[in-house]
Image (tube, rainbow, N blue to C red):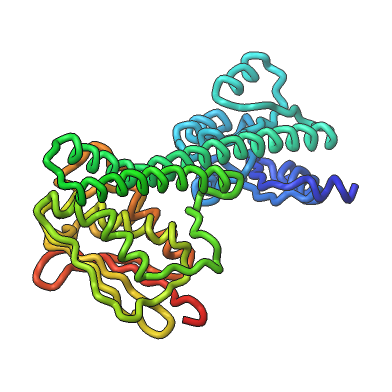
Amino acid sequence: MTARRQRLTGRILIVDDQPANLHVVSTLLARHGYEVTTAANGEVALEMLQTQPPDLVLLDMLMPGMDGFELMAEIRRQPELAQLPVVFLTVAQDRDLLLRAFETGAVDYVTKPFMPEELLARVEAHLGLKRMRDRLERVARERQELVNLVAHDLKNPLTSVHFAIDILLAGGVSDERRARYFRMIRESTDDAFGYIRRYLETQAASVSTPQAGDDAAVASVGELLQWLEGRYALQLEAQGSRLRLPDLPDPPRIRIDPVVLRQVCENMISNALKYAPGSDLDISVCSGGPGFWQIHFEDRGPGIPASQREALFTPFFRIEGSRDDGVSSGLGLSLARQIVGNLGGELWYEDRDGGGARFVISLPQAPGS
């Protein structure tokens, strides 16, 4: 009995206009480990369902006022409740009534007076089915999130490959520049394969929150700046702009995986290329207070309209009225903020003095730096 009580879990709402029935059923279920709430009529039940949906509803079919059929209709009209399993409790043996119950969306019924063993068996069966459905939906959602993550992170290196190939195909490139473009193609494809490998290795873990890398990993800001120059200086130059980087005699080291830091910064630069074309991009590094360093990305584009800033870091958000490349998913800033936040840092937007946009990444200083 102890093992079975531990196995039986779930929140159940019982709806019945008879206090004696509510008492008997709720006592039985609570004794077997369920969390039970009760409602004496359909109106109260509907309010409870909207504030805290249970895992299962035991619903009296025939009640005064809003009966079980009307309540079922309300439940099925609401998307967040549409999949909620409902078992009818009824004294009726009328075939038409039972068919009507199933037509309205009931998953089962139990006739009164019921046998405790039968009620418990049906409750556990439908809770088990709900748990299985929830688990399958979670797996499907996590797999889709993984696809979104991989597709988004592949977009930046593939954009660099596409840019370099277009320049080479156009011809008239010096030998020194040609070598730089070939290096860009090779490094970008290496990054793409690395992103795929990293996500394949971590897909068994939770993907609802982007992986921030090994907690012990350390990235050099100096190496990051060199990498950004090699990857993006030519792309900005092709737009008639410049990538301006700071000269750091003693570049800091911060607590984040270097590859992940590059991914986050790529999102900042790709947004500047897309939303502030023709503007120079200034990257600067400064102290963010005790134990933190900040990396600033600043352009002279139009900035972010005040009406859109609240949604700026939400998934799939894209700035209205901006130049759309037809590829953007709107995931970049959302994922970047989650990654930075997982490491105890912050990512935010602010207007740049004199006009333009400024994105600030604040991350903890590496231990011992």
- Toward the top, the furthest residue is 95
- Residue 2, how many percent across, how many down? 88, 51
284 lies left or right of 220: left
- Toward the right, the furthest residue is 1
- Residue 200, how many percent across, how many down? 54, 42
Residue in the picture at 61% in, 27% down: 106
- Toward the bottom, the furthest residue is 290
Nearest the eye: 58 or 320: 320
Residue in the picture at 39% in, 40% down: 151
- Residue 163, how many percent across, how many down? 22, 42
Residue in the picture at 75% in, 43% down: 25
Q: Is residue 53 visible?
A: yes
Residue in the picture at 45% in, 47% down: 195
99 lies left or right of 271: right
- Residue 39 versus residue 104 in the image, above or below: below
- Residue 119, how many percent across, how many down? 78, 34
